[in-house]
Image (cartoon, helix red, strand yellow):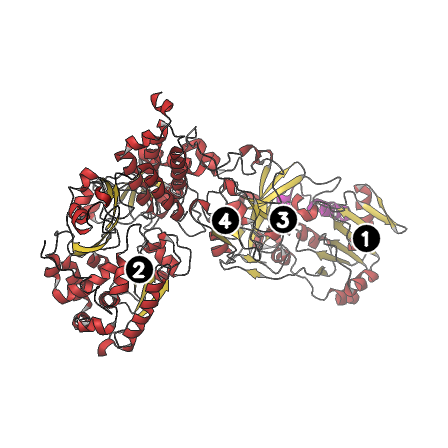
C-alpha cells in the first residue's frame, strides 16, 4: 500500500484514496464545501487546497489520489506522496478562498437558520480573516422558492453545486441547475418543474451554508436550543436513520443520520415531515373505561383490574391484534398474553419508489412488519374465520393510531366481541369501539427495537416525553400480565423484555441497546426459533 | 527569414480557395494518401519529430498529446477540432476555415487516423455562422469524394466528421469545457485528472486540437518533419499565423515563421502604429497574455521560450497593439469586464475575483480609488490566478487556466503602468 505523509503523520493508505479522505479518517481537518462523499467530485470550491510535494500548484485534496510511486520517485526514499495541509501557503490560500466566498455574503448570521451548524461560520472562525477588504457594493438578490418546501437565499449561496448534483445523481430528477454565468450564476429550477420530489428536503441538509432552507423549519428556532436524539424513521419499512431535533415536548425537525447499511446519507420527505402528524392529534392520555356508551377516565389500577377481570375468565379465548407500527418488545409482550388467534389491522400500503441512486421508499409504510412477524410467528391472514371457529369473544388490540374506517371484516369481528381492549395514543374509530382504552406513547415517545425489511434491528429512541398518564407499551402489557398471573415474570425495564424475547426467539438472542448502537444489527445469518 | 514562403495561407487570396477542386489542384489530400499507407504510430512519430506545438494557446506538443491516448482502448476514441476561436485579438482560425477548409479537414483526417478515431467533431464557435455553413458544404463535398465516410480512398480506414456549433461562450474553447458543451451540458471545465486523452468526450479517450494545429499536419506529412523543424526555433518551430490588431496601420493575419521579431510584425508587416504614434504596450498572445511595454516589445521574438522569459506567453499569437493614446486604466477595465463576463462561475476565485476586479476598477476610473486599491489589485489577481513563476510552473488556483488568463494581463497592466493608475486617484488621497 502507498505510504502517505500528511503533515507529520505517516500512514499507509489504499491505492486510489484521496488525500481528503485519508486526512479525514486520520483526524486531520481539511476544510471543504463542494465535496460530498455521496456525490461526484467537482473540485470547484477550492477550499480543500493542499500542498503536494513535487507539484507546482496547490492541489485540491478531494481530487488528489494517492498512488504507488516508482522507486526512483519516492520522496525521502520511502513516501509515495507528501502532503502539507497547514503550511503558510495553504493557510494563506484558505484565507483567500474564504475572502472570495464572503465578498457578497450578507453576514446575516443572527437571523440565519444555518447559524451554529454552518461551515461558512466554522471555517471563517478557524481559517478566515477577521476583517473584510471588500469596499464595493454587495450583490443583493431576493430569496426564491425552488419548490414548495425549499427556499433559496441566493446571497448566502456559495455555488458549491452540491444541491444540483444531488438532484442529478441521487434523486435523478434534475430539477436544479445553474442559471446565468460567472458572478451572476445562481441556483435555479424551472417554474414548471420545481424541486418537489420526495427527496427534496435533503438539499437543505447537504447545503453547507444557509442558502437552502426548508420552509418547515425556517425561522422556527435556533439550533443550539435544540436537543438531538439519534433514532429511526417510522414512516416505512426501510427504517432510515435520523436525528430528531426537539425542544421540550416539540419536534422541530428531522435530519437523516448516516448509515451505509440502511439509508446512506439521506431520507425522504415523507419521513422528514412525518412528525407533524402527531402534533395536533386528539391524544388519549388517561386510561378510560366505557360505560353506558361513553368513556370515563379511570385510574390505571381500575383499568388494569377491569381488563384482567374479563381476560382472566376461566377458559376464555383472547384474540390479539399486533402491529407493525409497534416495537418488537410490545408485540412480543402481547403475544405472551393472548391465547387465541393473532392478526393485524389492515396493512397501510402505498407506492414503492426506488431512485436512480438506489435510495428506496418502501410500499410498506409501517416500520416493523418484519420484526412483528419474527416475534409473533402465528399471524393469521384470515383472522375472522378463526375467531368464528374458536368462538373468541375477547380481543386485545395494539392500535397503530391510524384513523381507518372500520371495514366489513372488522365490523364482523367487533360484533362478535364481548370485550375489546385497545392500547392506543389516539382516539381512532377503532378505539371508540373499545371497552377499555389503555394510553400508550405516540411514535416519537416510544423506545424499543424495530426490524427493517432488510432484517436489521435498530434502536428506536424516544425524543419526546410521554403525555399525561400514558405509559410505555411494554409496561402496560406487563401490568396486564401481572394482573392475570401473579407469578408472571417482573420486568423492571425494557432490556429485560428484550432478554426474554431473545430466549424465546433465538434470532433476537443477546440483543441489547448497547449492542445495537447507532447503526443497528443485521439478523441475517441468525436462526429464528 | 525573408525567404519564408507562407505555408498555411499560401493560397488564400486565390479565387475559390475553399473548394475541393482548388485544393486538389494544388496537391491537396495527397497527405492522407501517404498517411493511409503508414501505421498510426509512424504518423505520431513524424508529428513528434516535427516538434509541432499546439496553436490554440497552451502550446502543448501535439505528438505528445496524441501519444497519451491508450493504444488498447476498448472505448471509441474521439478527435475534436477546436474551432471555438474566441480569444480577444485572435482571428486566424476563422481565416483558415473560410479560405482553406479542406486543408484543415485533411489535418483532421490525419490526426484521427493517428489516434485511431472514427468519429471526429468540429466544435465551431456559434457566432461563426458563415463558416459553419461553409464547413457543412466542405464536409459534404469530402463525403461525396470518399475523403470521409467508410473506407476512405479505398482503404480500411473510415471516419465520420460531425459539425457542432457552440453557443458563444469563451470558456467552451477550454478543452474540457468544450467537451462538456459537446456532450450537451453546461460548459463548465472538468477537474483533472482524468485528462481528456484518457476520459474525455462521453468518458472516452479524446484529443482536442486547434484548427491551425490541424492545418499544419498535411504539410508536415507531405514535406516531412525535418522541413517543419527547420522553420524557426527548435523548441517550437513551424509557420505561425500572427493576428495583429489594435493601433496599427495595417491590421490582419500574417503568416510568419515562429520566432519572428515582434518589432517586425508590428512595424513591417502591420505597417507601424496608427498616425505614427508612439507604441505603448502589446499583448503578444491574445488578451490572456501579460502585456509587454514598448521597450520590452521591440526586443522580443515571438517564440514560446523567449516570451516565457518575459513572463508572458505566445498564447494564440493574437498581437494587440496599444499606442500612446490608449488609457491603460480603461483598457485594463475593459479586459477585466471581458473576463468577468466570460467566467463560467464554477470556481470560487474566478467567479468572485473577476467581478471584484471590475467593481474596483470601475470605482477607480470614476475617480474614487485609493492607493490601497492598487495593492489590492495585485492581491486579487494573485489570489485568482497565482503568481507567474515559470521556474516552478505557475501557481494556478482554479480548475482551468481561466484564472491565470484573467490574473496575468491585469496584473501586468497595474505593474507596468502603475503611474497611470495613480493618476486616477483623487489627488488629495495621493498626497496623503
The residue that mark 2 highlights is B83
Pick out the residue farthest to the bottom.
B154
Pick out the residue farthest to the right.
A292
Distance (Cα) linking label 2 and label 3: 52 Å
* Residue B384: x %, y % from top left: 34, 40
The residue that mark 3 highlights is A273
Foreground residue among A367 and B238: B238
Q: Does any portion of residue A511 appear in the rendered image?
A: no
Q: Is residue B122 left or right of residue B48?
A: right
Residues tagged 1 and 3 counted as in contact (Cβ below 8 A): no
Does mark 3 fall on the same chain as mark 2? no
Q: Residue at x 73, y 61 (%)?
A: A341
The residue that mark 1 highlights is A432
* Residue B26: x %, y % from top left: 17, 71
Decide: few, some or many residues near mark 2? Use Cα within 10 Å; few <14, some 14-19, many ≥20: many
The residue that mark 4 highlights is A187
Q: Residue at x 28, y 71 (%)?
A: B159
Question: Which is more foreground, mark 3 or mark 4?
Answer: 4
Q: Sequence-wise, which precedes: disc 1 or disc 4?
A: 4
Foreground residue among A303 and A65: A65
Foreground residue among A428 and B158: B158
Q: Secondary structure at mark 3?
A: loop
Decide: few, some or many residues near mark 3? Use Cα within 10 Å; few <14, some 14-19, many ≥20: some
Decide: few, some or many residues near mark 4? Use Cα within 10 Å; few <14, some 14-19, many ≥20: many
Distance (Cα) linking label 1 and label 4: 51 Å
Question: Which is more foreground, mark 1 or mark 2?
Answer: 2
Q: Sequence-wise, which precedes: disc 1 or disc 3?
A: 3
Amino acid at each position: 500500500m502507498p505510504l502517505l505523509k500528511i503533515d507529520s503523520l505517516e500512514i499507509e493508505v489504499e491505492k486510489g484514496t484521496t488525500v481528503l479522505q485519508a486526512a479525514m479518517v486520520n483526524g486531520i481537518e481539511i476544510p471543504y464545501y463542494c465535496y460530498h462523499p455521496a456525490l461526484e467530485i467537482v473540485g470547484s470550491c477550492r477550499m480543500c487546497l493542499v500542498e503536494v510535494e513535487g507539484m507546482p500548484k496547490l492541489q485540491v485534496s478531494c481530487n488528489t489520489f494517492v498512488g504507488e510511486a516508482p522507486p526512483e520517485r519516492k520522496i525521502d526514499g520511502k513516501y509515495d506522496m507528501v502532503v502539507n495541509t497547514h503550511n503558510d501557503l495553504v493557510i494563506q490560500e484558505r484565507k483567500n478562498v474564504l475572502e472570495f466566498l464572503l465578498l457578497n455574503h450578507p453576514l446575516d448570521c443572527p437571523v440565519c437558520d444555518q447559524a451554529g451548524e454552518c461551515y461558512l461560520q466554522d471555517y471563517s472562525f478557524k481559517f478566515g480573516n477577521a476583517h473584510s477588504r471588500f469596499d464595493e457594493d454587495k450583490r443583493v438578490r431576493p430569496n426564491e422558492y425552488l419548490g414548495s418546501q425549499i427556499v433559496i437565499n441566493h446571497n448566502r449561496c456559495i455555488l458549491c453545486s452540491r444541491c444540483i448534483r444531488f438532484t442529478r445523481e441521487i434523486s435523478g430528477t434534475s430539477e436544479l441547475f445553474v442559471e446565468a454565468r460567472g458572478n451572476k450564476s445562481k441556483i435555479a429550477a424551472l417554474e414548471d418543474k420545481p424541486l418537489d420530489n420526495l427527496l427534496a428536503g435533503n438539499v437543505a441538509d447537504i447545503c453547507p451554508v444557509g442558502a437552502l432552507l426548508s420552509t418547515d423549519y425556517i425561522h422556527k428556532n435556533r439550533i443550539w436550543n435544540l436537543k438531538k436524539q439519534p433514532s429511526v424513521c417510522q414512516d416505512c419499512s426501510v427504517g432510515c436513520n435520523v436525528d430528531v431535533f426537539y425542544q421540550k415536548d416539540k419536534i422541530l425537525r428531522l435530519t437523516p443520520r448516516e448509515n451505509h447499511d440502511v439509508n446512506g446519507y439521506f431520507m425522504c420527505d415523507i419521513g422528514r415531515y412525518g412528525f407533524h402528524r402527531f402534533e395536533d392529534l386528539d391524544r388519549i392520555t388517561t386510561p378510560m373505561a366505557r360505560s353506558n356508551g361513553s368513556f370515563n377516565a379511570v385510574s390505571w389500577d381500575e383499568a388494569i383490574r377491569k381488563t384482567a377481570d374479563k381476560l382472566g375468565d376461566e377458559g376464555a379465548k383472547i384474540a390479539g391484534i399486533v402491529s407493525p407500527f409497534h416495537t418488537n418488545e410490545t408485540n412480543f409482550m402481547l403475544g405472551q398474553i393472548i391465547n387465541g388467534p393473532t392478526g393485524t389491522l389492515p396493512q397501510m400500503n402505498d407506492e414503492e419508489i426506488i431512485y436512480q441512486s438506489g435510495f428506496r421508499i418502501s410500499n410498506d409504510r409501517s416500520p416493523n412488519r418484519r420484526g412483528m412477524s419474527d416475534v409473533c410467528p402465528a399471524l393469521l391472514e384470515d383472522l375472522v374465520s378463526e375467531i368464528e371457529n374458536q368462538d373468541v369473544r375477547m380481543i386485545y388490540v395494539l392500535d397503530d393510531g391510524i384513523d381507518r374506517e372500520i371495514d366489513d371484516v372488522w365490523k364482523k369481528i367487533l360484533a362478535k366481541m364481548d370485550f375489546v381492549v385497545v392500547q392506543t395514543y389516539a382516539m381512532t374509530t377503532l378505539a371508540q369501539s373499545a371497552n377499555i382504552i389503555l394510553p400508550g406513547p405516540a411514535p416519537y415517545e416510544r423506545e424499543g427495537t424495530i426490524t427493517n425489511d432488510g432484517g436489521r434491528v435498530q434502536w428506536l429512541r424516544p425524543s419526546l416525553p410521554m403525555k399525561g398518564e400514558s405509559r410505555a407499551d411494554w409496561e402496560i402489557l406487563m401490568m396486564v400480565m401481572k394482573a392475570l398471573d401473579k407469578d408472571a415474570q417482573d420486568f423492571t425495564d425494557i432490556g429485560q423484555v428484550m432478554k426474554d424475547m431473545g430466549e424465546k426467539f433465538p434470532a433476537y438472542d443477546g440483543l441489547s441497546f448497547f449492542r445495537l448502537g447507532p447503526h443497528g444489527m443485521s439478523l441475517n445469518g441468525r436462526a429464528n426459533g | 527569414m525573408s525567404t519564408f514562403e507562407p505555408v498555411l495561407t499560401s493560397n488564400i487570396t486565390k479565387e475559390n480557395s475553399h473548394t475541393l477542386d482548388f485544393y486538389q489542384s494544388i496537391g491537396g489530400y495527397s497527405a492522407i494518401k501517404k498517411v493511409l499507407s503508414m501505421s498510426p504510430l509512424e504518423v505520431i512519430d513524424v508529428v513528434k519529430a516535427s516538434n509541432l506545438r499546439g496553436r490554440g494557446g497552451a502550446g502543448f506538443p501535439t505528438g505528445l498529446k496524441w501519444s497519451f491516448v491508450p493504444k488498447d482502448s476498448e472505448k471509441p476514441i474521439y478527435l475534436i477540432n477546436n474551432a471555438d476561436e474566441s480569444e480577444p485579438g485572435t482571428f486566424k482560425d476563422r481565416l483558415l476555415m473560410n479560405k482553406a477548409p479542406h486543408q484543415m479537414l485533411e489535418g483532421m483526417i490525419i490526426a484521427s487516423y493517428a489516434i485511431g478515431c472514427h468519429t471526429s467533431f468540429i466544435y465551431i464557435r456559434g457566432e461563426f455562422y458563415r463558416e459553419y455553413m461553409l464547413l457543412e458544404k466542405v464536409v459534404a463535398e469530402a463525403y461525396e469524394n470518399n475523403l470521409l465516410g467508410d473506407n476512405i480512398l479505398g482503404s480500411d480506414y473510415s471516419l465520420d466528421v460531425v459539425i457542432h456549433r457552440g453557443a458563444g461562450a469563451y470558456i467552451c474553447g477550454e478543452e474540457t469545457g468544450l467537451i462538456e458543451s459537446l456532450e450537451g451540458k453546461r460548459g463548465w471545465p472538468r477537474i483533472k485528472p482524468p485528462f481528456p486523452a484518457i476520459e474525455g468526450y462521453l468518458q472516452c479517450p479524446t484529443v482536442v486540437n486547434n484548427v491551425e494545429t490541424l492545418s499544419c499536419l498535411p504539410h508536415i506529412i507531405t514535406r516531412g518533419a525535418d522541413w517543419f523543424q527547420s522553420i524557426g526555433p527548435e523548441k517550437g518551430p513551424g509557420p505561425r499565423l500572427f493576428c495583429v490588431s489594435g493601433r496599427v496601420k495595417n491590421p490582419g493575419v500574417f503568416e510568419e515563421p515562429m520566432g519572428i521579431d515582434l518589432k517586425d510584425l508590428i512595424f513591417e508587416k502591420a505597417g507601424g502604429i496608427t498616425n505614427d504614434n508612439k507604441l505603448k504596450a502589446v499583448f503578444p498572445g491574445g488578451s490572456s497574455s501579460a502585456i509587454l511595454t514598448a521597450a520590452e516589445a521591440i526586443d522580443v521574438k515571438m517564440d514560446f521560450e523567449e516570451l516565457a522569459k518575459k513572463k508572458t506567453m505566445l498564447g494564440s499569437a493574437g498581437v494587440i497593439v496599444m499606442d500612446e493614446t490608449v488609457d491603460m486604466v480603461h483598457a485594463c477595465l475593459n479586459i477585466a469586464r471581458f473576463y468577468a463576463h466570460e467566467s463560467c462561475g464554477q470556481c470560487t476565485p474566478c467567479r468572485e475575483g473577476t467581478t471584484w476586479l471590475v467593481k474596483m476598477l470601475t470605482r477607480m476610473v470614476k475617480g474614487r480609488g485609493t492607493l490601497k486599491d492598487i495593492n489590492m489589485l495585485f492581491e486579487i489577481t494573485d489570489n485568482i490566478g497565482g503568481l507567474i513563476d515559470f521556474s516552478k510552473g505557475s501557481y494556478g488556483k482554479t480548475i482551468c487556466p481561466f484564472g491565470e488568463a484573467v490574473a496575468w494581463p491585469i496584473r501586468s497592466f497595474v505593474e507596468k503602468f502603475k503611474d497611470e493608475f495613480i493618476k486616477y486617484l483623487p489627488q488629495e488621497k495621493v498626497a496623503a
